Structures are given as C-alpha cells and as structure tokens.
Image (spheres, rainbow, N blue to C red):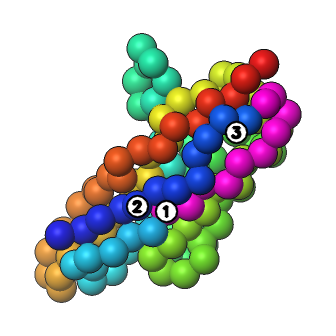
Amino acid sequence: QVQLVESGGGLVQAGGSLRLSCAASGSIFTIKAMGWYRQAPGKQRELVATITSDGSTNYAEYVKGRFTISRENAKKVHLQMNSLKPEDTAVYYCNAEIKTAWGTPFLHFWGQGTQVTVSS
C-alpha cells in the first residue's frame, strides 16, 4: 500500500501565502515524479505543478511566478503558494508516480486532498 499525506491547507486572504506539503510512504520502490493538482467546485481537476526525481519542474501558466514546487527528499515535496488569489480556491491533491516493486509499471497515486480557501 502507498499513502500520500498532505498538509498545510487553510484559509488565507488574497495576496497571502500558504505552504502545502506531501509525504509519501508505504510500499515504494522508486518515485518518478510528484506533483499537485487542484479541483474547484464544479470544475475538472487540473494540473498545478510537478517535479521529477531529477528536479525538473513544470507549472501551469496560471501559477507561474507565484507558486514554487520543491523536493525535500525522495518522498516529500512542498508547494509554496504566494500572491494567492480567490480563484486559487480549490481542493489541492498530491499526486505521485510510483513503482512499488522492481519490474512493475509506474502507477499514479493520490492523496486525500487539502482545502485551500482564498478570501477577497
């Protein structure tokens, strides 16, 4: 079993900052990439940012320059969110591409989500 545990969500005023963390644990052989997605009410889940095992990052256009994804170690990542806007309000989900044993394919795993609410 693989678990992704998120922390750091909450309520913040527009222009404020929050830091999300995601820690992976369980039957993990190797992790190819970790990242964050978000889903606002009535909308589809969308990419926020990803980081690969070699440190390459990818950001959605709407968070570039405001959000920064970083890797603390092989199994823990952070998302620093600055200059938050009301439209950033959503449930943020951690995602990881994980191989649970040698010779098995990479699979996507998801956390339970953490609420981020930005008030105007």
From the viewer's side, name the closer residue of 102 and 82.
82
The answer for how far apart the CA atoms under marks 2 and 3 are is 22 Å
Q: Amino acid at mark 1?
A: Cys
Expressed as whole percent of the image width and height from the top left, the position of residue 77 reads: 55, 67
Decide if residue 21 is on the left or right side of residue 42: right
Hey, which residue is sitting farthest front in the picture? 11
Answer yes or no: is residue 10 visible: yes
Expressed as whole percent of the image width and height from the top left, the position of residue 65 reads: 80, 45
Q: Which residue is mark 1?
A: 22
Q: Which residue is mark 2?
A: 5
**Magenta part of the chain:** 13-22
Hey, which residue is sitting farthest left in the picture? 103
Q: Amino acid at mark 2?
A: Val
Which residue is at a point 85% across and 34% down the rendered structure image?
15
SS at mark 1?
Answer: strand
Q: Is residue 100 above or below residue 12?
A: below
Q: Which residue is mark 3?
A: 63
Q: Amino acid at mark 3?
A: Val
SS at mark 2?
Answer: strand
Within 10 angstroms of label 3, few (less than 14), some, or many (20 or more) residues?
some
Q: Quadrant of residue 102?
A: bottom left
Q: Is residue 18 magenta?
A: yes
From the viewer's side, name the closer residue of 98 and 94.
94
- First of labels 3, 1 by sequence position: 1
Which residue is at a point 46% across and 30% down the rendered structure image?
39
- First of labels 1, 2 by sequence position: 2
Decide if residue 100 is on the left or right side of residue 76: left
